[in-house]
Image (cartoon, helix red, strand yellow):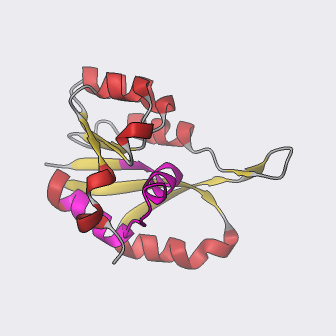
Amino acid sequence: MNNYAFIDAQNVHLGIKSLGWKIDWKRFRVYLKEKYSVANAYMFLGFVPDNQKMYEYLQVCGFILIFKPLVFNENGTVKGNCDADLVLHTVLKIDEYDKAVIATSDGDFYSLVKHLYATNKLLMVLSPYVKTCSQLLRKEAKEKIYSMDNLKAKIGLK
């Protein structure tokens, strides 16, 4: 199998953090390869210059990083919304992979998941925490949704 993963990095990070543990990205990449035969894992995130060492580490772990410039809203909060980039890459690369793994709980991806499911291109939606996962996303993924909340032993930071 030649499967690709498309990861909403901030959503996964914050979702796992809300469970009280941290994800070990290296172990997560191995998990994606072994469990879902993921050849390429694209990680979408906002670019923060001070995080260069982390970006280098993520690349060493085997992720392909897709950056979006950060914007700041009125109150100074950083926003690195990568949703459109994740959707675009998933669709543009659709002929390159057998199935897609989408890692997020964000309901903004329901149309993408609906399309992938309908075209038999969806392998799995990995939701960081199913209780906070969008109902729209769960509805469109149907049986192809898996909560990461019980993966601490496999992908948690030790």
Q: Foreground residue, 124 or 5?
A: 124
The quadrant where residue 112 appears: top left
Q: Quadrant of residue 23?
A: bottom left
Q: Which residues are magenta?
A: 6-33
Percent of width and height locating residue 98: 20, 40
Query: Residue farthest to the left?
Result: 1
Q: Is residue 75 above or below residue 141?
A: below
Q: Is residue 103 left or right of residue 78?
A: left
> Is 20 covered by the magenta stretch?
yes
What percent of the width, then of the height, locates residue 158? 33, 78
| 13 lies left or right of 129 | right
Residue 21, relative to residue 145: is it above or below? below
* Residue in front for this viewpoint, 18 or 94: 18
Whether residue 115 is visible here, answered yes or no, is no
Q: Can residue 117 be found in the magenta stretch? A: no
> At x 34% / y 56%, what residue is drawn?
41
Please, what is the dominant secondary structure of the magenta stretch? Answer: helix
For the question of whether residue 139 can be seen, the reply is: yes
Query: Residue 135: percent from the left, percent from the top?
Result: 41, 26
Question: Horizontal placement of 115 versus 83: left or right?
Answer: left
